């Protein structure tokens, strides 16, 4: 074992230890995970404890590694879409969109307005769903079961909407390169609007139960403070970075999908502690609801896929059944894959957990030569070994809950 | 510069520090919920409403005239991301069939339901509308072998679906017409 790092905090135990070396207790090694309810997946933490105080922490990841990047090299661009569901499996729709947009950037393809509007709604609904889970589970980690019940009821309604739109509740696989799998069902936008109306009172209810709750505040205020500089140096993104006070939001900074046309605010935190990260998620849900309402208000007509991309997006089904040319085109698309030019491209999208990036290297043809996925949860977790020391063992659940990571995306 | 909103926080008031408002509002929330309709479902007695175009178990379908629509082009086998489909093509040997010696049909069509991820790509690429993901979603079996569904089982699960095109009848009548013309 290496040298134990001394951490000076104002607690009684370490003060006593400083005053008299005789009191200095032996440190204890403690292993949490990989299967532990508070690690939200398969994260393993190896810690050195001085009594209740964490002296050292080493996160061990890789228990959910499936080799998605290598899998991508062995299949066509469209075949990889179901695999993107399984990155951040709490917001599969926004992963689908980010991946499709990365490949479209490679093909230099513009999708029509209607497709963009559908994708914006998908992304924002996925953000709401992910943050509802984030807030609910965070409340549960801090000891408030009720909040979880409220947010999960709302999330269930959202999943019914996803089911109608994509055919599946969880593994949506909704986008295709150059468009989306199918158009929105009749009356779906109205139901999304109804959901948006219903989610705000629930947020107020959650707000009443958590935000000014002294028990919750005692457990979160001033715990797990991440400074601006530290957050940036560890490459954190998303709500965790914004809670630290950096106003980096790719929807504003590098607008895609027409986000520049919608009016919304980027919430930023002042302290960067666990409490700020909770406030951040609650506020982002409200902003997302605002964006969805704006999209529904000006929902464009037109095709839901790029019609000029014959070598990328499959022809309509009734054409495949009746016309020889389209039938051949369909066969070519499936067996050869969507035809991409040579080149390298990197695209990042602002996902619920942070910026999810795809780096695609193409040598032409329908299969990527190399694909690199930048998972925001991976970068957000890398700070743990610096963040946890100095906190008590009981704070682990709260800090992990506040970081709101997904191991499927971290390990890939 | 992005339009930002700073998350403010105020210190707790005296009454909030006493926990009393929290306890009161918590009890109020419980009391209100006692009279609300339950949001859960008594599954399996009560079944959820399955929307149209749901991606459930993949099945093979017959057309309204009782013919197997699959022509074993193997496109679904090719596109399937987890490689769950295995097809063995063969000629149509049934002499009474109007497609005998013209088209193919699968001698064996196996879908390994343990591998299938219900992504729906097979349905999307099928040029015959022969494979459909329908509304059943809970499968069970005692062995792994049992979960590899063969052609007969898939056809039984799929049943008959309406056909808007009758591709083969059109093709045949067109052929007959050209023969008449000559």
Image: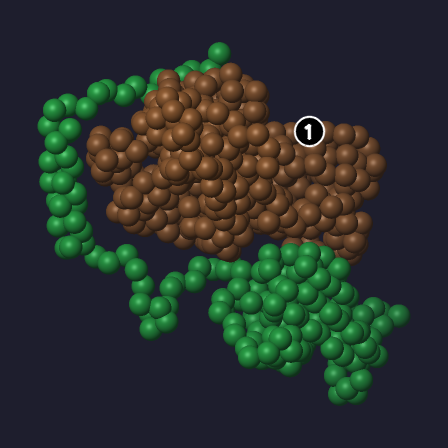
Nearest the camera: A40 or A30? Answer: A30
Image location (x, y in percent) of residue B112: 65, 70
Q: How many marks?
A: 1
**In the figure, the brown chain has which letter?**
A
Q: Quadrant of residue B104?
A: bottom right
Specify the quadrant that holds the N terminus of chain A.
top right
Residue A288 visible from this viewpoint: no
Relative to B171, does residue A240 appear above or below in the rendering? Answer: above
Q: Is residue A37 left or right of residue A380?
A: left
Question: At 74% from the left edge and 77% from the top edge, which residue is drawn?
Answer: B108
Q: Quadrant of residue A306?
A: top right
Question: At 37% from the left edge and 51% from the top edge, which residue is drawn?
Answer: A156
Q: Quadrant of residue A58?
A: top right
Image location (x, y in percent) of residue A387: 47, 28
- Hue used for the chain lettered B: green
**SS of the residue at dot 1?**
strand
Marked residue chain, label 1: A
Question: At 80% from the left edge and 49% from the top edge, which residue is drawn?
Answer: A336
Q: Which residue is mark 1?
A: A346
């Amino acid at each position: 074992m290496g040298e134990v790092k001394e951490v000076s905090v104002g607690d009684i135990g370490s003060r006593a230890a400083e005053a008299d070396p005789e009191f200095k207790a032996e440190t204890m090694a403690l292993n949490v995970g990989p299967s532990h309810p508070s690690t939200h997946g398969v994260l393993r933490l190896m810690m050195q404890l001085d009594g209740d105080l964490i002296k050292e922490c080493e996160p061990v990841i890789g228990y959910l590694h499936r080799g998605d990047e290598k899998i991508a090299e062995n299949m066509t661009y469209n075949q990889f879409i179901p695999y993107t569901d399984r990155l951040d499996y709490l917001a599969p729709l926004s992963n689908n969109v980010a991946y499709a947009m990365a490949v479209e950037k490679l093909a230099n393809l513009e999708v029509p307005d209607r497709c963009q509007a559908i994708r914006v709604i998908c992304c924002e609904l996925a953000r709401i769903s992910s943050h509802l889970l984030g807030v609910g589970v965070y409340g549960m980690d801090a000891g408030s079961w009720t909040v979880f019940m409220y947010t999960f009821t709302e999330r269930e309604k959202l999943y019914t909407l996803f089911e109608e739109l994509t055919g599946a509740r969880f593994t949506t696989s909704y986008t295709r390169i150059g468009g989306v799998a199918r158009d929105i069902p009749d009356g779906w936008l109205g139901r999304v609007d109804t959901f948006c109306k219903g989610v705000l009172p629930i947020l107020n209810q959650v707000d009443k139960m958590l935000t000014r709750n002294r028990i919750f505040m005692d457990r979160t205020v001033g715990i797990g403070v991440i400074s601006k500089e530290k957050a940036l140096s560890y490459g954190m993104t998303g709500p965790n970075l914004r809670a630290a006070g950096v106003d980096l939001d790719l929807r504003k900074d590098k607008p895609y999908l027409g986000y520049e046309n919608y009016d919304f605010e980027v919430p930023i935190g002042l302290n960067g502690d666990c409490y700020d990260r909770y406030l951040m998620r609650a506020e982002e849900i409200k902003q997302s609801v605002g964006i969805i309402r704006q999209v529904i208000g000006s929902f464009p007509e037109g095709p839901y896929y790029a019609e000029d991309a014959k070598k990328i997006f499959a022809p309509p089904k009734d054409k495949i059944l009746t016309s020889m040319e389209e039938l051949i085109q369909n066969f070519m698309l499936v067996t050869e894959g969507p035809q991409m030019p040579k080149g390298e491209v990197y695209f990042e999208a602002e996902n619920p957990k942070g910026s999810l990036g795809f780096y695609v290297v193409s040598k032409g043809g329908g299969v990527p030569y190399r694909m690199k996925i930048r998972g925001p949860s991976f970068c957000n977790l890398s700070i743990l070994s610096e963040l946890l020391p100095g906190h008590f063992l009981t704070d682990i659940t709260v800090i992990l809950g506040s970081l709101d990571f997904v191991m499927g995306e971290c390990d890939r | 510069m992005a339009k930002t909103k700073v998350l403010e926080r105020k210190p707790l008031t005296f009454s909030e520090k006493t926990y009393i408002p929290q306890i009161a509002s918590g009890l109020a929330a419980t009391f209100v919920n006692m009279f609300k309709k339950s949001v859960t479902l008594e599954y399996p007695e009560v079944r959820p409403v399955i929307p149209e175009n749901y991606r459930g178990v993949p099945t093979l379908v017959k057309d309204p005239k009782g013919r197997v629509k699959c022509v074993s082009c193997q496109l679904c086998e090719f596109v399937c991301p987890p490689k769950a489909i295995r097809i063995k093509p063969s000629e149509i040997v049934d002499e009474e069939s109007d497609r005998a010696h013209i088209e193919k049909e699968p001698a064996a069509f196996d879908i390994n339901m343990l591998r299938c991820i219900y992504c729906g790509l097979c349905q999307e690429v099928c040029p015959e509308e022969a494979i459909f993901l329908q509304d059943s979603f809970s499968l069970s079996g005692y062995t792994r072998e049992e979960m590899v569904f063969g052609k007969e089982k898939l056809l039984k699960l799929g049943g008959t679906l309406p056909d808007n095109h009758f591709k083969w009848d059109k093709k045949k009548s067109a052929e007959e017409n050209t023969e008449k013309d000559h």
